[in-house]
Image: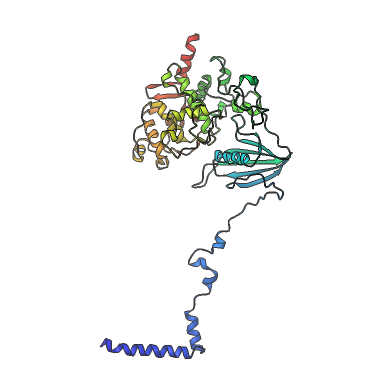
């Protein structure tokens, strides 16, 4: 019965289509066509059912600050940096930039750019004048200062540090004065270019950088009496004074910048990775001065550097390379092929402090760990933010009870904040004691042992 009705249906459709075709210009057909047409509003507002036109979405906000029209095109500019300020200076123009990239990456960029584009490097970064380049090409001089900065109140998923670049240029940009060696040239290595040689690119290195001043505990008393320790708690204050008396802490960088002796410790200043590495080696070796088997050996310049940003000429090469050679910090030597950069000027984080320190406390392989184990022991609410590589060290630190680094340095807390930068006072507090609960040595113990032969 149904099959019999299908020809009639097809015939009706044919008649309807013929009528519409024949009356295409009629008012009825026009109304039907308009009712079936697409809504014209969709053509101008595609965002209603989808995303906006690509041309509109790609329009990113631009900085209101613009480079001067006569900015020299030969000056290399770091692409991932935002121009923040342009100000006239006494010798030309100064510009200020901000970047989310680490300072050591930007430093490497400028070093390569200056060398590849025939700039004469008058000054390059040293421990005394951190992250400053002064270069000249023809009649143009440029000074590039690269400094890590702590971000206050960072937004979600935003790094807690950024890098500030100060680029000054003009006819004469004065380089910071560097210490001049007092030794005769004949007493130095003849294979190393010196000031006055055609291949010397500066700066002049200070004499005996790695040597320690010969002093007794009484001689270092003035060093340990920093004038700004009222900014920290009484417990941390004593820790800092003990370490200073041992010769572990230094204020050399502060003194070099002002060319005067200073007794400012700056306890609340963020400590860098290279500074903590230097203190870590010095503190461990001072604690175990009479036990060579527990000391960290400084690396010699004959070995291949474990990190591409720590050349053999770096003042901290011996300590940083020594830590890598001992397997105390992650590097390609320890099988971590991604750790090719040490990032010496980056802030030290809490989890890095624990990761570097714990092997020197336990003197044995760290136990296995997972998120549940750390959460059950410490009770940290943010345990999921801890780097998996640092979990074992954090768990092992719990076994030391009240002598654990986390309790001694940060007190009672349910938030570890593993990515939070460490202050100089906190870094010193962690190094005041080496060992586990009931089996360790403090800076106070080491001082008594050091003074005993003179009493």
Q: Can residue 330 be seen in this view?
A: no
Q: Seen from this angle, which residue lies furthest left?
A: 1
User: On the picture, is 396 further left or further right than 113?
Assistant: left
Q: Which of 201 and 434 is in front in this view?
A: 201
Tell me the residue at 57%/27% (across/down).
Answer: 265
Percent from the top left, x then y, of residue 31?
A: 50, 85
Q: Of residues 45 and 141, which is closer to you in this image? A: 141
- 210 or 451, which lies in front? 210
Q: Quadrant of residue 384?
A: top left
Q: Nearer the viewer, residue 282 or 383?
A: 282
Q: Position of residue 10 (x, y in %)?
A: 35, 88
Extreme-top residue of the structure: 455
Residue 357 in the image: state x and y as whole percent: 44, 29
Q: Position of residue 131 (x, y in %)?
A: 60, 35
Q: From where the camera sits, is residue 297 visible?
A: yes
Residue for point 70% across, 49% down: 68
Answer with the quarter of the image where residue 173 lies. Answer: top right
Indicate how the structure is coloured in the image.
rainbow
**Is residue 151 shown above or below 401?**
below
Q: Quadrant of the N terminus?
A: bottom left
Task: Find residue 372 and report its image quarter.
Answer: top left
- For the image, the number of numbered tags is 0
Residue positioned 41% across, 36% down in the render = 335
Q: From this view, report whether residue 45 is shown above or below residue 211.
A: below
């Amino acid at each position: 019965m149904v099959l019999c009705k299908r020809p009639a249906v097809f015939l009706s459709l044919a008649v309807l289509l013929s009528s519409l075709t024949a009356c295409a210009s009629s008012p009825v057909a026009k109304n039907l066509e308009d009712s079936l047409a697409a809504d014209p509003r969709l053509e101008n507002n595609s965002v209603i059912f989808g995303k906006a036109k690509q041309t509109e979405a790609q329009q990113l906000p631009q900085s209101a600050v613009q480079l001067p029209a006569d900015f020299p095109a030969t000056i290399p500019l770091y692409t991932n940096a935002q121009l923040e300020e342009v100000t006239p200076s006494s010798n030309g123009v100064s510009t200020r930039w901000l970047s989310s990239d680490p300072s050591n990456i930007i430093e490497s960029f400028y070093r390569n750019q200056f060398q590849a584009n025939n700039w004469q490097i008058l000054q390059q970064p040293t421990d005394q004048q951190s992250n400053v380049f002064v270069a000249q090409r023809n009649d143009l001089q440029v000074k590039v200062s690269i400094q890590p900065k702590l971000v206050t109140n960072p937004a979600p998923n935003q790094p807690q540090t950024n890098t500030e670049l100060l680029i000054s240029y003009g006819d004469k940009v004065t380089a910071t004065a560097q210490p001049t060696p007092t030794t005769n040239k004949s007493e130095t290595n003849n294979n190393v270019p010196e000031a006055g040689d055609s291949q010397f690119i500066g700066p002049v290195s200070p004499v005996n950088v790695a040597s320690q001043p010969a002093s007794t505990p009484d001689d270092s008393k003035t060093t340990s009496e920093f004038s700004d320790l009222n900014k920290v708690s009484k417990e941390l204050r004593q820790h800092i004074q003990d370490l200073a008396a041992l010769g572990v802490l230094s204020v050399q960088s502060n003194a070099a910048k002002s060319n005067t002796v200073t007794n400012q410790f700056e306890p609340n200043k963020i400590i860098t990775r290279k500074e903590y590495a230097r203190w870590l080696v010095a503190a461990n070796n001072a604690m175990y001065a009479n036990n060579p088997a527990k000391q960290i050996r400084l690396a010699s310049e004959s070995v291949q550097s474990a990190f591409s940003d720590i050349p053999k000429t770096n003042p901290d090469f011996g300590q940083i390379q020594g830590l890598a050679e001992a397997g105390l910090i992650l590097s390609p030597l320890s099988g971590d092929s991604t750790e090719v950069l040490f990032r010496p000027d980056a802030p030290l984080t809490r989890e890095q402090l624990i990761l570097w320190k714990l092997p020197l406390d336990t003197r044995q392989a760290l136990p296995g760990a997972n998120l549940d184990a750390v959460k059950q022991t410490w009770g940290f609410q943010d345990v999921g933010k801890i780097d998996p590589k640092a979990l074992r060290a954090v768990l092992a630190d719990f076994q030391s009870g009240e002598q654990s680094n986390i309790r001694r340095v940060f007190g009672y807390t349910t938030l570890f904040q593993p990515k939070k930068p460490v202050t100089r006072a906190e870094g010193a507090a962690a190094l005041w004691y080496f060992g586990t609960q009931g089996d360790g040595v403090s800076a106070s113990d080491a001082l008594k042992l050091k003074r005993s032969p003179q009493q």
